[in-house]
Amino acid sequence: MKALVLSGGKGTRLRPLTFTLAKQLIPVANRPILGYVLDQVRDAGIAEVGVIIAQETGNYVKDYVKDGSDWRMRVDYILQEPLGLAHAVKQARPFLGGSPFVMCLGDNLQGRGISNLVRRFEEEKLDCLILLKEVPDPQRFGIAVLDSGGRVTKLVEKPKEPPTNLAVVGTYLFSPKVHLAVDRIKPSWRNELEITDAIQEMINMGFRVKAEVLDSWWLDTGKKDDILTANQIVLDEYVRRDVRGNVEESTVEGRVIVSEGASVKGSRVRGPCVIGRAASIEGSFIGPYTSIGDSAQVVNSAI
């Protein structure tokens, strides 16, 4: 099993943040979103990872991920123009070879890992396994229709009259048969090769395509409000008390990370929150669900 992690795109909805930063590197709880995605790939026991990058932001991604050794994996970088998710699969074919693979969007976060999905995919000998989530606004997403056995019978992209409220989340598992389907589809009205079209073609070809409904949270961090929501949820889920910096005449309550080199003086900090490396907090109140970035200074303020 290999992994394909998509870290390309231009991030136009997150400008001006993404003028000088890949959207997958925007920090959530003081850590790039991409780092959490790679954690889940590593925890599933996958050691060979292809990272899709864009010409404009690829160097930023390389500077962060490097050779992948921080995650105990080997990383290959694959350059792609933003011509659709199925096009990314096509570009990655030399890396993927004849291996099954999991494909993850580098700017999506979900509340559980992918280990169970990988196990089910292998045990049931599937050709495709997609992750779904019930959403209140299915008109905004690719929507799946399932039969009573959990097989996917139809996919509809952003339907005006949605047949279900099961949105396709950015995690997909494929056998090598997906390449046959990708070769048969045509660009959509957006001039992109859509992964939903490729999966529908797999269904049409009689391949085993199933879905699993996510029973935890899922965040597509494509807009600024999503980033703030992700920051809150990740702080709630991941932060454990770890005070390594200097704390003087201050109160630090609950699940708070005070990173190495940080300084908290004459202040009150209430978790969950993260104080970054070399940050300085003085005479201030830092409230719950707050991330203070590395080297930031907060003086006589309340956040």
Image: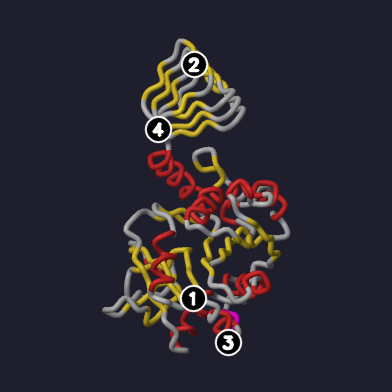
Q: Position of residue 232 (x, y in %)?
A: 42, 41
Q: Residue furthest top?
A: 249
Residues in magenta, as a range: 184-188
Whether residues under marks 1 and 4 lie with C-beta atoms below 8 angstroms apart, the answer is no
Q: Which residue is mark 1?
A: 196
Choose top left, top right, bottom left or bottom right for residue 208. Answer: bottom left
How far apart are the alpha carbons under marks 1 and 2? Answer: 52 Å
Do labels 3 and 1 touch, CB within 8 Å?
no
Q: Which residue is mark 2?
A: 247
**Residue 26 vs residue 92, the one in the foreground:** 92
Query: Gap between marks 3 and 1, in whole Å?
Result: 13 Å
The magenta stretch spans residue 97: no
| Nearer to me, 256 or 99 | 99
- Label 3: which residue? 184
Q: In the structure shown, which secondary structural element does the residue marked by tag 3 occupy?
A: loop
Instruction: Answer few, some or many: residues within 10 Å of disc 1's Cα (few below 14, many 20 plus, some between 14 and 19).
Output: some
Q: Are marks 2 and 3 in contact (CB under 8 Å)?
A: no
The Cα–Cα distance between marks 1 and 4, rounded to whole angstroms, is: 38 Å
Q: Secondary structure at mark 1?
A: helix
Query: Residue visible at 68% across and 73% down?
Result: 94
Q: Where residue 149 sits in the image (x, y, percent)?
A: 29, 78
Q: Amino acid at mark 1?
A: Thr
In the picture of the structure, the residue carrying the numbered disc 4 is: 272
Q: Work out how far the residue at label 4 is from the one at label 2, CA to CA, in angstroms.
A: 17 Å
Between disc 3 and disc 1, whose residue precedes?
Answer: 3
